[in-house]
Image: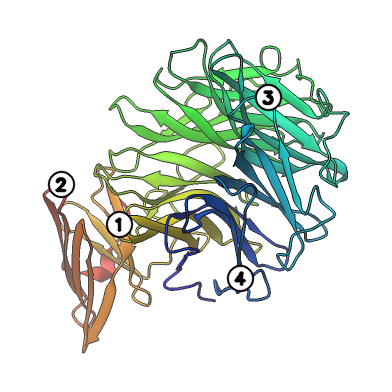
Amino acid sequence: MTFGSSGKITTDFFNDSDAATDIAVQPDGKIIAVGDAFNDSTSFDFAISRYNSDGSFDTGFGSGGKLTTDFFGEGDFATAIAIQTDGKIIASGFAQNNKTGFDFALTRYNVDGSLDFTFGAGGKVTTDFGSSLDTAFALAIVSGGKIVVAGTTIVGATLNDFALAQYNSDGTLDSGFGLSGKITADFFGGNEVAHAIAIQSDGKIVASGSSQVAAGVPTDFGLVRFNTDGSLDMTFGVNGKVMTSFSGEIEEANAVVIQSDGKIVTTGRAWSINGQGDFGLVRYNGDGSLDSGFGSDGKVITDFSGGNDAAQGIVIQTDGKIVVAGSAFGGGTQGDFALARYNVDGSLDFTFGVGGKVTTDFGFEDGANAIAIQADGRIIAAGFAPDISTSYNFALVRYDGDGPFFNMCLQDDSNGNILQINTATGNYQFTNCSGFTVGGTGTLTRKGCTITLQHNNGDRRVLAKIDTCQKKATASIRLLSQGTTFTITDRNTANNNCACGN
């Protein structure tokens, strides 16, 4: 089954800046994306779109497959989504009002996208922690249909702490959780933000994000584990908390997942020795200690092409492999969707994309914020992509389980550079076997034995010609921002290994 246009779809709400921040797949295969949309006046609203499994709008949801929700007429930002067992949909984030500033915000929708009036006040709930900046970034449904939301709040004058709130199924705060339904957690008096949560099989809550050993110093990966009543789990790390540093620069964990064996995997942005952000991946044992059997002493860093990369979402396949999604900048100023897949020991899975990595370009600056896996093993990433250079839309990409399907590989006879092409869709991915990878979707033309792929955008000129009768090909990949041109001459397309180093 095809998905959108060449595996990609974009969704515009108000002809302005829209971005998807989270994604979920319903049991019936329909796909829900949530984020925020600028409402053509002065503020953002919660925005949700639902798609059929082929990427077309589900017209029975909201208005033609889309809906927006406003709280106080000011800035509202949806950051997470979850689906209840009864099919109702919960979105969380933060909303601004002129009295308390930003507060945690939740909405619940019926299966058709209408607000569920049995939840909170008219389907909406806001929670103030007492500061002007209470922002929620993660959401999970726990035992009994209760809802837990995590983010950050200002404690004291200027410093942020992890903040969590737990709600009953009707949207009221759960008085048996923390202090009247709310908890905060501080590491060492610095700034801390919870970006993600995961629920263990025993009901304990793991929150991941960024933490500091003191105010004013670079942040590290930070994890906190809570008991089901909101108290710190003293069996985890040091007094329930763990911090992990890669290089001593600004680092943060943006997503977390629990393996079937109870080990915890978190991912985000880590800084490499070249002074750029990379995908950072850490695995912990159940007690919070680093898993020495994963990567290098529990940690993995992945660079795409020397630019500034950051991971935002993570999922675990049924075979235990780990898939991470985010953005890669390729040494220039324009980001692309970026995915990496890892084996259970943290090594890159070379059966996925090129050398374990895949990038997808929409034509300007774009990136993935979330990832999900369908029942058939296909992978969906959601984020943002340009409409024009100053406007963005929801963007979704679907991949086969082994990345975008490429049925043709061109490999340079002298240096091994690789250009993979899908001759049905125009999807392509190039790597120069020195860590640089770039991909996109070009235009295909056919004349006799010759297939031509061409892709021109603001930063790139790609031209490939394949003679299927003679089984030979040439290609040129010109990167305008870098002033670099890569060429491929493949005199026998039938003998390619299509892997760097071969």
Q: CA distance from mark 3 to mark 4?
A: 36 Å
Nearest-to-viewer mark from 3 and 4: 3
Q: CA distance from mark 1 to mark 2?
A: 20 Å
| Image point (33%, 52%), residue name | 365
Of mark 3 and mark 4, the one earlier in the sequence is 4
Q: Quadrant of the N terminus?
A: bottom right
Dividing the picture into quadrants, the one containing residue 187 is top right
**Is 312 on the left-hand or right-hand side of 89?**
left
Residue 24: assigned label: none
- In the picture, measured across the screen, residue 193 lies left or right of residue 105, that is left
Secondary element type, mark 3: loop
Q: Nearer the viewer, mark 1 or mark 2?
A: 1
**Which kind of residue does numbered mark 3 sit on?**
Gly
In the rendered image, residue 310, in percent from the top left (x then y), is placed at 42, 39
Q: State the residue in front, 248 or 283.
A: 248
Q: What residue do we see at 63% from left, 76% from top?
A: 59
- Dot 4 or dot 1, earlier in sequence: 4
Which is more N-terminal, label 2 or label 3? 3
Residue type indicated by callout 1: Ser
Q: Which residue is mark 1?
A: 389
Residue 65 image label: 4
Q: Which residue in the protein does label 2 denote? A: 482
Give the amino acid type for the residue marked by disc 2 in the picture.
Answer: Gln
